[in-house]
Image (tube, rainbow, N blue to C red):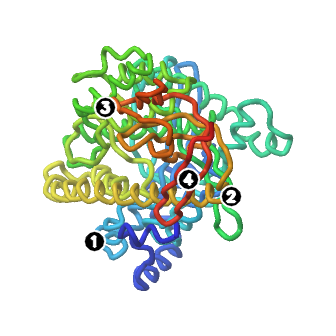
Amino acid sequence: MCRRDHRRNGIPKKFKKEILRQTEELSREPITPAERKKRADLREQLIFTIDGADAKDLDDAISVEKDDAGWKLGVHIADVSHYVKEGSLVDEEAKQRGTSVYFADRVIPMLPEALSNGCCSLNAGEEKLAFSCFMTLDRKGNLRGYRFQKSVICSKVRGVYDEVNQVLEGCAAERLKEKYRPVLASLQAGQELAQLLEAKGRRRGTMDFESSEARFFLDQNGACVDILPRSQGLSEKMIEQFMILANQAAALYAKSLEIPFVYRVHEDPDPERLNTLQQLAAGLGLRARRIQEGVRSADLSDLLRQAEGTPAQNIINHQVLRTLAKARYDNKPLGHFGLNLDDYCHFTSPIRRYPDTAIHRILTGVAEGITVDRLQKKYQDFSREVAVLSSACELRAQRAERQAEKCYMAEYMRRHLGETFDGIVSGATVRGIFVQLANSVEGFVGVEDFPDCEFQFDGLLTHTDVRSGRRLTVGDPMKVQVAAADVATGRIDFTPAE
């Protein structure tokens, strides 16, 4: 049932034959000497990628060098817009898809594999076309300059997050030490810079959520056999910081030129939801006086830090996410609340996000010397259309991914019917409570499952039994038994086990 969620949410899966034919032809096009002459030749530079072990669409590579003045950071992004020409069948299909959709067992790509996993992917040892962002930072990690240039690169190492984490933590096997020896100095310089950037973000008020995402493990038949919390190591944090910085630089550049653009925006939280969050946080014993209309991202970051490492952590994370507005795309720079930045965009993932491809196309026009007036005429309506359509496509993809995750969780818990687990009360409604397990699985316990109790609900946090005074409050530990799991809907039901 989990495999049908792309159909249920209207996500196209197969590409038309003509599109596949065109992309196969594109993927076989050689990089000509004339094309190389137009670009910065970075093939001899120490550039490398770091991605998940199973990733095939490698759209970002980095180069890092530390000197007496600070750092020189290069973020080199697959030049998808070179292959996907404006108005082509491939371009129109990518625009309608908007984004790649990721499930535990497969990816529904925005672009056909001949591009996404082939000529656009920055595979190690292969000459590739890129769009590079060169940044200089001082010794405190402040961005002092940036420039954008088309390039040709050759990645030296295909890094894997888990492996790089072992190298940076000093616990790598000899085989891994040898693999990463050519880029070890770059990794160490990059880690130092990333830690500076992360600290600057915290001081700025960037919201840092401790991930509560799940990682699904499937057997050879595609059935979910285990679920573990997804963790973020040193290398994941490093790449995240570098991509945020490149995205910020692209937005700053576009705004300074006053050209049409597609910005990533995140508006202020809804006041009513802030009030709910304030009551919840206060009920859990957290300092929440500043959680009100006009709240700063720094105030919400402080709340997240208070909850970190406590039973309330996942509950507060979840409620803060519900309180925030949904990030979206817009052709105006409306700011990004969560990152506490005035200007932000998505530049770094054109293989899997159409807005990135769109702004690459606009920045290519800048590099080619097209005047601002001509860019306005050419891309003003385009940037507005892309922002609206891509925001809708992103929501569609998120719905499909989340529903599939629920189905996988139900499939896994169906294997454990009748078994007992420790959990935490993660939510409450008039009908009952939600309990979340350590592996992030959440199930429902109805008030009718407490036959000897007569509960009254306070409307937010707590059910109180009017007979015994027993309280069921969000944040309380609770032992539950798996009663039912419906794979088709993703619903999981628990019963009390104590």
The local secondary structure at tag 1 comes to: loop
- The relative height of residue 8 versus residue 316 in the rendered view (above or below) is below
Q: Amino acid at mark 1?
A: Gly
For the residues labelled 4 and 1, say whether their Cβ atoms are less than 8 Å apart.
no
Q: Are marks 2 and 1 in contact (CB under 8 Å)?
A: no
Q: Amino acid at mark 3?
A: Phe
Lateral position of residue 4 relative to residue 124, left or right? left
Q: Mark 4 belongs to which amino acid?
A: Ile
- In the rendered image, the vertical position of residue 144 relative to residue 112, given as above or below: above
Mark 1 = which residue? 87
Q: CA distance from mark 3 to mark 2?
A: 38 Å
Residue under pointer 3: 337
Give the residue type that dot 2 points to. Answer: Val
Mark 3 or 4, closer to the camera:
3
Are the residues tagged 3 and 1 within 8 Å (C-beta)?
no
Q: Earlier in the sequence, mark 3 or mark 4?
A: 4
Q: Identify the secondary structure beneath mark 4.
A: strand
Instruction: Give SS at disc 2.
Output: strand
